[in-house]
Amino acid sequence: MGLGECLLGATEARNVARVMRHGALFRYYGPGALPSLGFATRFERAVARMHRCKYALGVTSGTAALEVALGALGVGPGDEVILPVWSWVSCFTAIVRVGAKPVLAEVDDSLNLDPAEIERLTTPATRGVLVVHYQGVAADMDEIMQRARRNKLWVLEDCAESLGATYKGKRVGTMGDIATYSFQQRKVITTGEGGMVLTQEGRLYERAVRMSDIGQYRDEHRAIKAPEVVGFSGSNYRMTELAGAVGCAQFARVLPMIRHLRRLRAIMQREVGALPGLAWRKIADPSGDLGFDSYFFLPTHEQALALKAAAQKRGVSLAPHTGTYCQYAREYCRSGATHTANFSPFPTTGAWPAQGYREEDFPRTSNLVGRMVSVPLGARFSAADAAHVGKVIREELGKILA
């Protein structure tokens, strides 16, 4: 069922061996640095080229990328950031870690942020919107950007699970102010752990570099963009040469893998056919979907559970490729706790969870998530595998909906 993790092979091994021979595991120096550009730099340039983006910065994880991007944007105590309630842990915790307040929004039947939530949730303290392109499908960026700009908000695109996806001919990650990617084990491509920050704005790039390299701005980055930012206290999220070596090998497989997954999705959906009561996930631009997880909704939660159980008995898993949750169901949201109470963006008085952090505050998202079914397709699946998955769904769902 995997993606890039299923394609690890000889090229990754050769690249890693080359790094080991030279002994320069740190990207900026070592006992025997590579005779040409290091792998971390090559990886950055390859990703930037595909996105036609000026600046790319490799970091240690997708979570680190979010914190670096928020730091580059200057987000901190007293600020609010809107994000979808249906999203990964890091989307919430990264905002809290920089001292800002996450403001949770409903998703629509695309399973992405409902653009109308931007107006509903914007307050004088709102600084920006964190958009999550969930599981290979772009959010409705035209509507989101229009509403964000109208309210003078920046947009951060979280593309952790959507490397290579497009929206009306544009790569996700190129429409907002800054974007983040993840290369964790279960992502589109993997370096085990790893991440990247992309932006077209030089000042944001420099601030991201300084945020990721304890405030420093080394010669390699000065050659890309002259410094203009006063040095500040950053953290340490630098990508290693080992991660860059694996990333370069993995990245070369992205576009062929996407084409394969899209073919599989078309086969699976043709086999499922039209069934009464089945509604496929809304996709703003179907041609840009990666195809590895397809979602549909059934009339009831009970029917969704019944289908998953019946398919599992026939060897077909209908569980999502990666774990995503409603934020209100997570311990850190239920408690409102931070690593120190002095740094908490949440109220310290009254009952918690407060309004805006409880299940009852998100009836639409809760309803959608309860009725949804995921159809994961992997990089090693064949056309016959995809057809079998579609056949099982059609046959078992036909019994349930009869």
Image (cartoon, grey):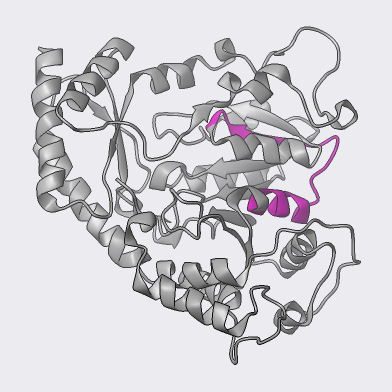
Residue 293, position in %: x, y? 32, 42
* Residue 231 painted magenta: no
Residue 151 location, x and y as percent? Answer: 69, 40
- The reply, left or right, for residue 152 in relation to residue 53 is right
Image position of 380 with respect to 201: above or below: above
Q: Quadrant of residue 397?
A: top left
What residue sits 81% from the left and 29% below the top? 345
Quarter of the image where the N terminus is located: top left
Residue at screen point 40% across, 55% down? 165
- Please tell me whether residue 87 is drawn above or below residue 193 in the rendered image: above
Q: Is residue 75 left or right of residue 314?
A: right
Res. 152 in view: yes
Q: Quadrant of residue 116?
A: top right
Over which residues does the magenta segment extend? Answer: 65-86
Q: Which of 91/183 is in front? A: 183
Quarter holding the C terminus is top left
| Residue 40 location (% of width, % of height) | 59, 73
Which residue does the image show at 40% across and 35% down from the upper left? 110
Q: Is residue 53 visible?
A: no
In the picture, measured across the screen, residue 111 lies left or right of residue 58, that is: left
**Magenta stretch: includes residue 82:** yes
- Looking at the picture, how far across and down is residue 282, in whole percent? 34, 36
